[in-house]
Amino acid sequence: MASTAEGWANLPKEHNLSKFAADLKGILESTGHNEMYGVELKSPEDGQPPAHTTLLILQKFLRANMDDLPKAKEQLTAALKWRKEYKPLEALNETFPSDKFGGLGYVTTIKGAKETRNDKDVATFNIYGVAAKDPKKVFGDTDAFVRWRVALMELTLQHLHLNEADKAIPDYGKGADPYQAIQIHDYLSVSFFRQPAEIKASSSKIISMFSQYYPETVSFKYFVNVPLVMQWMMGTMKMLMSKDSIQKMTWMTYGNQLHQYLGDGIPKEYGGTGPGLRESAVTVKYDGGKPINEEAAAKA
Ligand code: HEM
């Protein structure tokens, strides 16, 4: 299915995306919430074509459910209810403690990613290796970690400019859906043989929440600095993930292998020639305290 404004201009009425848009009114009324990733969902006026920005969001829910309309509607309803209650956008204005989450995540833009075939991509780096020394501190309070992770995700989505999708097809863009981000997990300095309980709890919570509430928002996922002795974890993680998601995952033993996938503009520690994340990327708001592992954060 084309995801361009042009491609959607003549969307047939019997297409599932048109039907989804036509049913949106009821969904918005029943949930009492009409915002998704900062985009105002609008049900089409009589006879008018649905807004491109709305279709873009609906398409994500349809795709995640393999074009099964009733399931897509159910998922959208649940996601809207969650947003109404959890208020994820507000997390962007909250201040997070540096000594717990400082240096743990960044959002940036990269050029030349091989797999997306886009000119530009938004990329989120999760430097989870930073937390390996003291996983209890970072992951011990699952709710606090989830709030921080949601803030980073909302920041990522803001950088995709979903709201402006109707104005022009941006230069992010030849792939099937340019409105997705790349995700990188950096596990530098991780060396344990068993997965601590708090990491397990937080990671499975995020995996399940994000597949429910943020469908089709991430394109490719890269796991770097995964020591050989830790690669067994991929097996346990795969059990929590969809087949489609697994197909878009790549993992590697060394950080400097990443430039083979994401181009030379990425930081040196990933094999590129670009500036470090601390200088070039953005992140959520912190209280200015000492980061959890200053040494590791400084390398980023
Ligand atoms: C210190 C060790 C680790 C920590 C703290 C950690 C943390 C996390 C967290 C919090 C998530 C939730 C998803 C997210 O935040 O985006 C996650 C997901 C995941 N992790 Fe790890 N992890 C660790 C080690 C590993 C290792 C060694 C592997 C194996 C390569 C691995 C593979 C994965 C996979 C495949 C996912 C699912 C990603 C997704 O669906 O988005 N993790 N991890």
Image: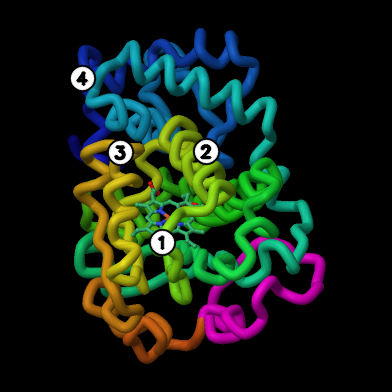
Q: Distance between the residues labelled 1 and 3?
A: 19 Å
Read off the residue under disc 4.
Answer: 12
Q: Which amino acid does label 2 sit on?
A: Lys
Foreground mark, 1 or 3?
1
Mark 2: C-beta under 8 Å from nearest atom of ligand 1: yes
- CB under 8 Å between callouts 1 and 4? no
Q: At x 66% / y 61%, what residue is drawn? A: 284
Taking 131 as reference, is 76 left or right? left
Q: Answer whether residue 284 is magenta in the image.
A: yes
Q: Which amino acid does label 1 sit on?
A: Phe
Crowd around label 4: few <14 · some 14–19 · many ≥20 (10 Å): few
Q: What stretch is highlighted in magenta?
A: 277-300
Crowd around label 1: few <14 · some 14–19 · many ≥20 (10 Å): few
Read off the residue under disc 1.
Answer: 193
Read off the residue under disc 2.
Answer: 205
Q: How far apart are marks 3 and 4 (CA)?
A: 38 Å
Residue 53 percent location from the top left of the image: 43, 37
Taking 42 as reference, is 139 left or right? right
Q: Could you say which disc has been placed on residue 181 in the image? A: none
Q: At x 68% / y 32%, what residue is drawn? A: 86
Quarter of the picture containing the N terminus is top left
Residue 248 percent location from the top left of the image: 24, 52
Q: Earlier in the sequence, mark 4 or mark 2?
A: 4
